[in-house]
Image: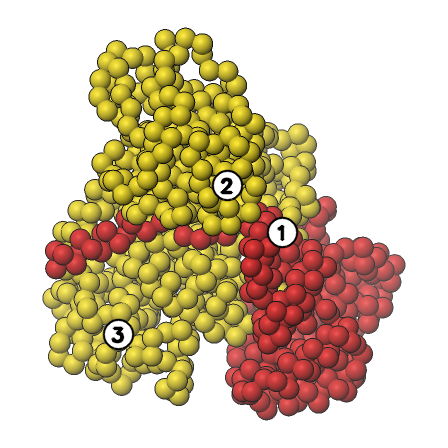
């Protein structure tokens, strides 16, 4: 026992003071560049691409991912990263299809198949995306929630909110994810289905610290039922809360999107457009204020 | 050295707590107010059983084998399999202990059939959480970037254990902000660099983790697959409070009146439209807690070994996630990734790139209860009422500072960790270094209504000046040569010395198998006496020799005069006395070299503050490691003299 512990101690103290850690990205790139100069490999190019991506140097990252694939055409992480980096381009689509068809196991094919669907969706081909999403749902019962969210987004693009709502509701029941539940509620409102969701909305209003997003949802439900008085009351309450929550400078922009939506629903178009203009100038992607855009 | 001796003694005389049946010792996970998980691994088949109760002597409750989840290698085709890099014969056992009393201490033991595997030792215990919302103090430990299995990691852990023993305090839990298993978070790295290192703590304290980029090399947040997700059980269904995320990658839990939020800053969509940000917003809207602490790996504010103005993940966490957290009323944000301790002033709205101090600092004092006084915030969670951001990536790796972040009140290059207490209306944070010294204390006092106006011209930290030691190109004229030009040295090239990275420089190290040659050493430039054919082969050369230091010598008049290309680290009697052009570490791990040409000149470096390591009237040893910036370099030179001024 004593001998074993002595060895354990020696093993501890003889280990290097620092294992290969992750340091300054520029220096890591220099180190990797020197290694690539000496003995290039797909892994080294892939690692350097990851570092370039951290520095937001997309072009360099793409160049390295291409080099990685030249060295090792089957380098899966490099291929997936390249597909993601190339966005909705034709090349990205071709690469994703190629990776999908070369994935031997069903489990390995899920990610490239998802990417094919997403690229189709981004390229404005929701019908192609939809077919693939439907297949993905069948491939694995416990699939990633990303697939459900994309599937619903595609159905919304095809103006099928009721179907999107069903997908999200089922996904929520499978995972309990609150994001899926809230997306289901929002999609159900777009589909003008309020029966199942109103009890949840009311429960959330009574139990939440911040209630504005739930008051907006209840107002949308009220408008579906032409209850303008309830809608107006909820929207005013939501606006009062947001006025307290929104920082005058450098605000949480997601709250600006909520405020813009309230103004749009109240009919205060000028203020809604002012918020929309603020959002359009911001770093937020347009999808984060789509409901405001659609309402206006 | 004292700490090494301590480690040795601890290792030698520790209670018989490592049991060979375990390939990963027992540890606890996902405590709630009425349940907890006990997990362990074995390489042999067993009939697992966990018994537990309110004292070591009374373990009257049982989780039988049939209720213990056994997870196996994926090749065995069972559900809930472990990651593929796990040894094929590994079994991971996960026992869920339910119907426990809140805020209560239980003791447990693991059995294989009738054979007890864990000793009858009161360290095998756990305490359940209080019922969410109850007014119970919380005391927790925060560590980041520690997973090296090196000395610093062990010392940081040891310092915390000793600090708590001296103070008579016990941790309620432990938060790790990522990079707990360098280099790729493999199954073996988790065992060696996390579980083995923290085992005495992990058996009775739950670690709530967030994934670092190193774990992210093998584990994926979107799918929850990999060694990280095998090691931890995190809430997906709001088991411990908060809202269900459906994913272990991001989650929340409640402890008393505090709400804790973990985010995955590494490999998930960080945009406001992403699933994680949507969940975060919903979770913040729902919580009724009075304190709010968030943690994730990539720091929104740092100028340590990483720069938050330049790197995408860091920028996105600042621009996309911080606004949501601050409008949700966050009090404290802990991160890692950058190997440094940086603690901010009370800030709000610092989302710009690059970060600027103007208009975002609400209180520029030091926040120290014994200094300028604690920061003040309103009672409860209020939007944009001020945040303290702490980068705590100093848990075990070499620290580095690249600049000065304008929001920071404390910037400390020292390995350590954070100990946080939330009691009554006050949050108190302490940074404990690896020697057990408190290097920083801050507090946030939340009472009444406090309104802040951003300070227009806030206090600013001193700008960072890279530590370039001053050199005088000319040696003192009256100096005596203790080691002369072209003196004989023992030298080693083409391999690294055995032992710890600096063992070879110690007086007792045996170099009888090293070659002997006259300085200078190197190649190219025609300025070397002993030619070392290192081009394309190796970049480091080690040299050492003895020298006599006369009795009565003026010890602060010692200096090195060196002709060098490119960089070097010098030691006397095993202690580093000067480094030139090497940013960090030493030997095989040395990195961050600065190119330098010898130019047939000797530069003089006075050696100050080393009198305690010198042996006047006796034999001393000088040792130098020379580094070339790259293998293909056209030249290398290392030619030292040791001088003693009058």
Tell me which chain appears red.
A
Q: Height in image: B418 above or below A57? A: above
User: Sequence-wise, which precedes: disc 2 or disc 3?
Assistant: 3
Element at label 1:
loop
Judging from the image, mark 2 belongs to the subunit labelled: B
Image quadrant where one finds the N terminus of chain B: top left
Q: Residue at x 34, y 32 (%)?
A: B489
Tell me which chain appears yellow.
B
The 10 Å Cα crowd at callout 3, few under 14, some 14 to 19, many 20 or more, is some
Q: Is residue B76 left or right of residue B66?
A: right
Q: Which residue is mark 3?
A: B42
Q: Residue at x 17, y 47 (%)?
A: B9
Judging from the image, mark 3 belongs to the subunit labelled: B
How many marks overall? 3
Q: Which residue is mark 2?
A: B628
Q: Residue at x 25, y 57 (%)?
A: B200
The 10 Å Cα crowd at callout 2, few under 14, some 14 to 19, many 20 or more, is many
x then y, percent, for residue A93: 73, 78
x then y, percent, for residue B632: 55, 47
Query: Based on the displayed image, in which of its 4 quarters is residue B328 positioned?
Result: bottom right
**Colour scheme of the rendered structure:** by chain
Image quadrant where one finds the C terminus of chain B: top left
**Res. B448 visible in picture:** no
Query: Based on the displayed image, in which of its 4 quarters is residue A215 positioned?
Result: bottom right
* Residue at mark 2 to residue at mark 3: CA–CA distance: 46 Å
Q: Which residue is mark 1?
A: B311
Q: Is residue B297 left or right of residue A46?
A: left
């Amino acid at each position: 026992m004593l001998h074993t512990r002595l060895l354990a101690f020696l093993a501890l103290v003889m280990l290097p003071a620092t294992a290969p850690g992750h340091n300054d990205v520029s220096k890591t790139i220099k180190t990797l560049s020197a290694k690539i100069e000496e003995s290039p490999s797909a892994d080294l190019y892939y690692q350097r691409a990851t570092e370039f991506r951290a520095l937001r140097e997309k072009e360099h990252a793409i160049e390295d991912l291409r080099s990685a694939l030249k060295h090792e055409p089957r380098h899966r992480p490099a291929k997936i990263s390249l597909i993601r980096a190339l966005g909705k381009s034709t090349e990205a689509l071709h690469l994703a299809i190629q990776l999908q068809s070369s994935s031997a196991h069903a489990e390995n094919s899920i990610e490239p198949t998802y990417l094919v669907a997403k690229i189709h969706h981004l390229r404005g081909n929701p019908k192609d995306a939809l077919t693939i999403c439907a297949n993905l749902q069948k491939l694995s019962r416990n699939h990633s929630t990303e697939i459900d969210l994309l599937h619903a987004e595609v159905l919304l693009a095809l103006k099928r909110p009721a179907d999107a709502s069903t997908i999200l509701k089922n996904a929520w029941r499978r995972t309990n994810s609150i994001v899926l539940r809230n997306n289901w509620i929002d999609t159900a409102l777009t589909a003008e289905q309020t029966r199942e969701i109103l009890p949840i909305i009311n429960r959330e209003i009574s139990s939440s610290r911040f209630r504005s997003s739930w008051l907006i949802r209840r107002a949308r439900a009220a408008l579906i039922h032409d209850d303008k008085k309830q809608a107006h009351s909820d929207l005013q309450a939501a606006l009062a809360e947001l006025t307290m929550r929104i920082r005058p400078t450098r605000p949480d922009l997601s709250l600006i999107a909520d405020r813009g939506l309230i103004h749009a629903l109240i009919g205060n178009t000028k203020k809604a457009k002012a918020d929309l203009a603020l959002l359009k100038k911001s770093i937020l992607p347009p999808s984060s204020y789509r409901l405001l855009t659609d309402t206006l | 050295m004292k700490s090494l001796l301590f480690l040795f003694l601890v290792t030698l005389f520790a209670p018989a707590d490592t049991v060979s049946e375990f390939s990963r010792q027992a540890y606890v996970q996902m405590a709630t107010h009425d349940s907890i998980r006990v997990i362990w691994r074995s390489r042999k088949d067993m009939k697992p059983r966990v018994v537990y109760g309110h004292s070591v002597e009374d373990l009257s409750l049982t989780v039988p084998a049939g209720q213990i989840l056994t997870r196996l290698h994926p090749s065995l085709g069972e559900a809930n399999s472990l990651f593929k890099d796990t040894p094929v014969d590994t079994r991971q056992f996960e026992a869920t202990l339910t119907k426990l009393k809140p805020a209560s201490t239980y003791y447990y033991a693991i059995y294989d059939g009738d054979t007890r595997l864990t000793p009858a030792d009161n360290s095998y215990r756990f305490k359940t959480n209080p019922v969410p919302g109850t007014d119970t103090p919380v005391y927790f430990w925060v560590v980041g970037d520690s997973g090296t299995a090196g000395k610093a990691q062990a010392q940081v852990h040891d310092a915390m254990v000793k600090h708590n023993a001296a103070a008579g305090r016990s941790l309620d839990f432990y938060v790790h902000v990522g990079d707990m298993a360098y280099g790729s978070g493999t199954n073996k790295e988790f065992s060696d660099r996390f579980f083995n290192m923290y085992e005495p703590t992990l058996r009775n304290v739950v670690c709530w983790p967030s994934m670092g980029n190193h774990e992210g090399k093998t584990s994926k947040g979107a799918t929850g697959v990999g060694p990280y997700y095998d090691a931890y059980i995190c809430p997906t269904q709001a088991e411990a409070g908060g809202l269900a995320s459906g994913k272990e990658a991001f989650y929340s839990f409640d402890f008393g009146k505090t709400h804790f939020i973990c985010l995955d800053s590494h490999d998930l969509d960080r945009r406001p439209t992403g699933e994680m940000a949507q969940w975060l917003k919903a979770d913040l809207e729902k919580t009724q807690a009075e304190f709010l602490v968030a943690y994730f790996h990539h720091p929104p504010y740092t100028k340590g070994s990483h720069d938050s103005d330049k790197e995408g993940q860091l920028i996105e966490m600042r621009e996309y996630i911080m606004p949501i957290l601050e409008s949700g009323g966050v009090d404290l944000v802990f991160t890692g990734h950058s190997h440094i301790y940086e603690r901010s002033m009370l800030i709000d709205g610092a989302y710009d790139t690059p970060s600027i101090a103007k208009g975002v600092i609400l209180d520029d004092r030091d926040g120290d209860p014994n200094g300028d006084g604690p920061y003040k915030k309103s009672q409860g969670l209020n939007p944009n009422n001020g945040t303290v951001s702490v980068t705590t990536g100093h848990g075990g790796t070499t620290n580095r500072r690249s600049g000065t972040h304008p929001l920071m009140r404390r910037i400390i290059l020292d390995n350590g960790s954070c100990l946080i207490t939330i009691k009554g209306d006050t949050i108190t944070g302490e940074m404990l270094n690896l020697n057990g010294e408190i290097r920083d204390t801050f507090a946030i006092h939340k009472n009444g209504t406090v309104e802040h106006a951003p300070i227009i011209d806030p206090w600013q930290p001193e700008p960072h000046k890279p530590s370039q030691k001053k050199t005088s190109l000319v040696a003192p004229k009256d100096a005596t040569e203790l080691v002369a030009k072209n003196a004989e040295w023992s030298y080693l090239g083409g391999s690294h010395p055995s032992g710890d990275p600096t063992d070879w420089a110690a007086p007792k190290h045996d170099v009888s198998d090293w070659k002997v040659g006259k300085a200078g050493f190197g190649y190219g430039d025609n300025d070397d006496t002993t030619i070392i054919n290192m081009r394309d082969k190796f970049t480091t050369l080690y040299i050492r020799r003895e020298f006599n230091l006369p009795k009565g010598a003026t010890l602060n008049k010692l200096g090195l005069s060196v002709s060098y290309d490119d960089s070097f680290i010098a030691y006397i009697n095993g202690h580093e006395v000067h480094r030139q052009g090497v940013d960090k570490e030493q030997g095989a791990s040395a990195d961050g070299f600065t190119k330098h040409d010898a130019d047939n000149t000797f530069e003089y470096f006075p050696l100050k503050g080393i009198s305690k390591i010198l042996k006047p009237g006796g034999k001393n040893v000088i040792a130098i490691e020379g580094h070339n910036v790259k293998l293909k370099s056209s030249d290398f030179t290392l030619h030292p003299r040791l001088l003693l001024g009058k």
